[in-house]
Amino acid sequence: MVAADQKAGSGLLTPIDKEEDFVEKLCSTGIKVVEVYSPWVGPCVAIHPTLKQLRTVLSDNPSTAEVSVEFLSVPSDQIAELEQFQGKSQPHFLLYQNGHLKETIDGANAPALTKSVTSLAAEAADSQENLDDNPRFVKKREEQVARYNSVTKPSQ
């Protein structure tokens, strides 16, 4: 199932502008196509037809229809992990699968983006994704357990 739009009026991309929201998205299974842009330039509108086509192709293909693919839009100055992209005039697309960065595509390179996302979706359809293989999920779970233990531990 290709993820539906998350916010009314957002179109194709779910805007993410908080570190915790970015981490939360990457803590889940599935493919995340993250457009990283500089705020002074804004998101790349030219790539939207490619994203629409990708969403349709993946949904219509029986082998990839059940693969979760989300398109996210993130300003480079809001997320520490993305600070290397600050000040760049071209968009960058980061492709994550089950929390792992699989590929980076510089610029609005529609053929490369289409090929990479389609390939990752086919790979995901052939494999069993497990959250225990997602390093971001594991780290978050360990932090939650540590917080729980520090709160519930009896004082001596």
Image (cartoon, rainbow, N blue to C red):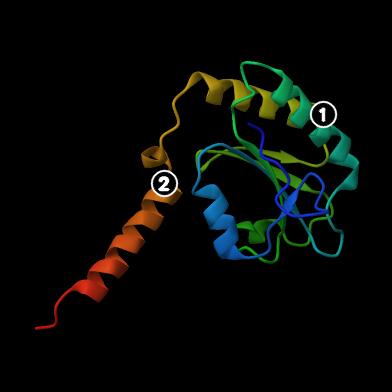
Q: Secondary structure at mark 2?
A: helix
Return the x and y of residue 25 as percentages of the image width and height: 57, 51
Residue lying furthest top:
62
As displayed, is residue 80 above or below residue 111?
Answer: below
Residue lying furthest right:
46
Residue receiving disc 1: 53
Instruction: Characterize the local packing of mark 2: few (<14), some (14-19) or many (20 or more) Cα atoms within 10 angstroms.
Output: some
Return the x and y of residue 53 as percentages of the image width and height: 82, 29
Instruction: Characterize the local packing of mark 1: few (<14), some (14-19) or many (20 or more) Cα atoms within 10 angstroms.
Output: few
Left or right, 84 with respect to 52, comes to: left
Left or right, 124 with respect to 37, comes to: left
Viewer-closest of 114 and 151: 151
Residue lying furthest front:
8
Q: Secondary structure at mark 1?
A: helix
Viewer-closest of 121 and 152: 152
Quarter of image, res 93:
top right
In the picture, the quarter occupied by the N terminus is top right
Quarter of image, res 54:
top right
As displayed, is residue 97 above or below residue 121?
Answer: below
Of the residues shown, which amino acid type is indicated by label 2? Pro
**In the rendering, which numbered label is found on residue 135?**
2
Tell me which residue sits at (47%, 22%) in the image. 127
Q: State the CA–CA distance, disc 1 to disc 2.
A: 30 Å
As displayed, is residue 31 above or below residue 119?
Answer: below
Tell me which residue sits at (60%, 27%) in the image. 120
Q: Are marks 1 and 2 in contact (CB under 8 Å)?
A: no
Of the residues shown, which amino acid type is indicated by label 1? Gln
